[in-house]
Amino acid sequence: MPAVPAHGASPRPTRGAGLLERFLARLRHRAALALMPAPAPGAAILDIGCGAWPVLLLETRYDRKFGLDPLAGTVPGVPPGIEMKALRLAGPVTLPYPDGAFVCVVSLAVLEHLDQGSLPSLAAEIRRVLAPGGRVVITTPHAVADPLLHALARMGLASREEIEEHQTLFRRRDLRALLLAGGFPEAGVRVGSFLLGLNIVALADK
């Protein structure tokens, strides 16, 4: 079981160990936070793959915060106002929320851990749970970064546990195609990169 963060401590953002993990997670968070829609009163946000401790959700100003992760519930003491549920994203995905429940959905460094068979249903489900005008923000390593990430893991700079679980490698066109296949309108899909092009960031508006 992951350790409970001590009072005042900054919890580990990912599983496993790596000297650069906090830095890399922070870059992902900054990229996502810059693209999230400004929350109106009562707006809800969903973080898919939030980890055992909802670091990103704690940084947002949404009134209602929800997280999904296989490790949800393994660390006690989640701050009030955040509802976390355990969900394993494998096979056909069904998100346990009603249609149009969220103004924003984020999924950071998650899709690369999923098999290709799970991705189309996840994209469609994200669109379903977004409210009209809602936005999804996704990050994933670029396929060209995979050899570098494995090298960093061998050197103890990135989490070997996280890197060795990667199942699907993405290029920008792949992430765009996935969002379009999920039903997002082409005009609402934008795909870019950060960290010298080694990571992809995409957004799609419903």
Image (cartoon, helix red, strand yellow):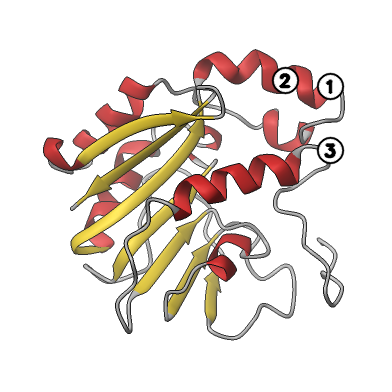
Closer to the chain start, of discs 3 and 1, is 3
Which of 32/82 is in front?
Answer: 32
The residue lying at 83 percent from left, 68 percent from top is 9
Mark 1: amino acid: Arg
Mark 2 element type: helix
The residue lying at 85 percent from left, 64 percent from top is 3
The residue lying at 53 percent from left, 49 percent from top is 30
Gap in Å between the C-alphas at discs 3 and 1? 12 Å
Mark 2: amino acid: His
Mark 1 element type: helix
User: Residue 143, can we see it?
Assistant: yes
Residue at the spot of label 3: 19
The residue lying at 50 percent from left, 68 percent from top is 60
Residue 156 rendering spot, x and y as whole percentages: 86, 29
Residue at the spot of label 1: 154
Report the mark closest to the observer, 2 or 3.
Answer: 3
Mark 3: amino acid: Leu
Residue 151 rendering spot, x and y as whole percentages: 77, 17
Mark 3 element type: loop
Gap in Å between the C-alphas at discs 2 and 1? 6 Å
Query: Crowdedness of circle 3 by 10 Å Cα count: few (<14), some, many (20+)?
Result: some
Report if the CB atoms under discs 2 and 1 are less than 8 Å apart: yes
In the rendered view, tell whether residue 3 sits above or below residue 152.
Answer: below
Dividing the picture into quadrants, the one containing residue 79 is: bottom right
Q: Is residue 192 left or right of residue 76?
A: left
Closer to the chain start, of discs 2 and 3, is 3
Residue 69 rendering spot, x and y as whole percentages: 57, 58
Gap in Å between the C-alphas at discs 2 and 3? 14 Å
Residue at the spot of label 2: 150
